[in-house]
Amino acid sequence: MASSSLTPVMKNGACRNWAELPYELTLSILRRLDIVDILVNAQKVCVSWRRVCKDPAMWRKIDMSNLEGFGYTLERMCRHVVDRSHGGLLEVDISNFATHSLLEYIADRLNSPLGITSYYLQSCRSSSLRSLRNCHLSMDNRLAEAIAKLPLLEELDITFGTSLSGKSLKVVGQSCPNLKTLKLNRDLSMCPRDLRDDDALAIAETMPGLRFLQLLGSSLSDFGLNAILDCCPDLEHLNLRWCHNIKLAGDLEKRCSERIKVLRRPRDSADDFPYAYAYSSGDSYDDYDPEDFDYDF
């Protein structure tokens, strides 16, 4: 382990040790690092930084969207920091490596007494998670059941979902009444041409509070879109790129133009959609073990 004597910085002409910075300032600084840097480097610098890195307040938001190429290691790291959040996780972005088992782990940990005081369980019986982004998973019953354990969810992003079941979407909508942002995006190289409105009707029936809806590559028709507009009065942002069955003409086009503040049409370019990730790294943490980074001083 590195020595606790850090390189001093100058303040008003005098030297100041990084380890002696105020706790909240250190917390704010370390939050700006990515998870790999925190677990592999920062928390090993000194005793005070280690304590900050173990503070559940460090793990209210987990963004692993820019990490790729670490394989199974990322899932192990994610599970480790979810445990460190002690049930206080608000946002998680697990692009590129999400699995059903990982999502179930997150949902179960946020609803279990592991590391959470009894007072917390009594005052907040369900998960506090508000945002779940970029899960590249199919929307099947298993995923829907895991999401159903997150009743305070406000943002859900299921990207590259290959099986959008209306039944599963209903479970999500009924279980997450606060949902305001929904992204259901297919792989744009595999967009179906068959007409299906079951997902659109499920959204219309169970998600009336939506404000942001992104349905890239969806198979919904004008009928399904009208149902969504009928039942989601607060909808402001609607992304329908690559929705080949949408005609968006006449009264429907007028309705969308008048009601929707930001409208992306079926034939609009999707070049800015981040369906391919360029991040790569030569570093390897395949031997990552949470126990190696969970010692106490």
Image (cartoon, rainbow, N blue to C red):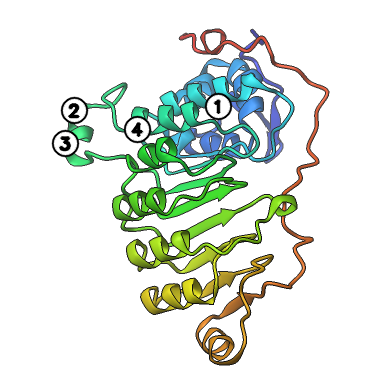
| Residue located beneath label 1 in the image | 20
Cα gap from disc 2 to disc 4, whole angstroms = 13 Å
- The three-letter amino acid code for the residue at tag 3 is Gln
- Counting residues from the start of the chain, the first of labels 1 and 2 encountered is 1
- The three-letter amino acid code for the residue at tag 2 is Ser
Please state the horizontal and vertical placement of residue 60, each as a whole percent of the image: 45, 39
Asked if labels 3 and 2 touch by Cβ distance under 8 angstroms, the answer is yes
Furthest toward the right, the residue is 282
| Residue located beneath label 2 in the image | 118
Asked if labels 3 and 4 touch by Cβ distance under 8 angstroms, the answer is no
Residue at 62% in and 69% down? 240
- Disc 4 or disc 1, which is closer to the eye? 4
Asked if labels 2 and 1 touch by Cβ distance under 8 angstroms, the answer is no
Residue 40, quarter of the rendered image: top right
- On screen, residue 119 versus residue 164, left or right, reads left
- The three-letter amino acid code for the residue at tag 1 is Glu
Furthest toward the front, the residue is 194
Please state the horizontal and vertical placement of residue 254, each as a whole percent of the image: 56, 91
Up-down: is 29 above or below 275? above
Q: Which mark is residue 122?
A: 3
| Residue located beneath label 4 in the image | 110
Residue 136 vs residue 58, the one in the foreground:
136
Cα gap from disc 1 to disc 2, whole angstroms = 33 Å
Asked if labels 4 and 2 touch by Cβ distance under 8 angstroms, the answer is no
Residue 169 vs residue 17, the one in the foreground:
169
Cα gap from disc 4 to disc 3, whole angstroms = 13 Å
Cα gap from disc 2 to disc 3, whole angstroms = 6 Å
- Disc 4 or disc 3, which is closer to the eye? 4
